[in-house]
Image: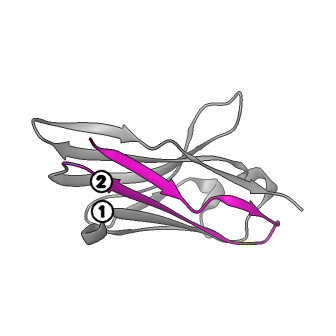
Amino acid sequence: QVQLVESGGGLVQPGGSLRLSCAASGSIFSIYTMGWYRQVPGKQRDLVATITSGGNTNYADSVKGRFTISRDNAKKTIYLQMNSLKPEDTAVYYCNADLRVPGQVDNYWGRGTQVTVSS
């Protein structure tokens, strides 16, 4: 069974840092674009950052200069280093990936990890 499992969320004060991780597991032949999205209650899920298999990155304007996405292909893992966190960064952060599994390429979501920025 293919899974994306996020970790690293928590409570942090404004201006602080957190590092999220997302590990893919299961019968995976290839991993294409992976990314992070976030959602607050009552709102749509928004893009935070993506990274292609070649390492090209894309960021939402609201996090540029503060967040850095990276990946370790050998570990099938992506990371999101979040610095200078603001209260408006509070959300559930979801990992997303395009994966080649037996028979097809499909899109997968993790279950999410809560990030709360508050004093």
Instruction: Tell me which numbered mark, 1 or 2, is placed earlier along the sequence.
Output: 2
Kindly identify the residue that appears in the image at 31 percent across and 38 percent down.
Answer: 107
* Numbered disc 1: secondary structure: loop
Callout 1 touching callout 2 (CB < 8 Å): yes
Residue 13 image position (x, y, % from top left): 82, 66
| Number of callouts | 2
Q: Residues within 10 Å of mark 2 (few under 14, many from 20)?
A: some
Q: Give x and y (percent) for residue 5.
A: 44, 52
Location of residue 18 in the rendering, given as x and y in whole percent from the top left corner? 64, 68
Q: Which mark is residue 105?
A: none
Quadrant showing the C terminus? bottom right
Which of the image's four quarters has the N terminus?
A: top left
Which residue is labeled 2 in the image?
25
Residue at image location 82% in from the left, 66% down from the top: 14
Residue designated by label 1: 76
Residue 22, horizontal then vertical, whole percent = 44, 58
Residue at horizontal 57 percent and vertical 36 percent from the top: 45
Query: In this picture, is 35 found above or below 110?
Result: below
Q: With respect to residue 43, does 91 lie above or below? A: below
Residue at the far top: name it: 42
Secondary structure beneath label 2: strand
Residue 98 higher or lower than 34, as above or below: above
Tell whether position 48 is magenta. no
Query: Image check: 72 left or right of 104?
Result: right
What span is colored magenta in the figure?
Answer: 1-27
- Residue 14 in the figure: left or right of residue 7: right
Label 1 or label 2, whichever lies nearer to me, is 2
The kind of residue on which mark 1 rests is Lys
Give the spatial CA distance, label 1 vs label 2.
Answer: 7 Å
- Relative placement, left or right, of 112 versus 99 is right
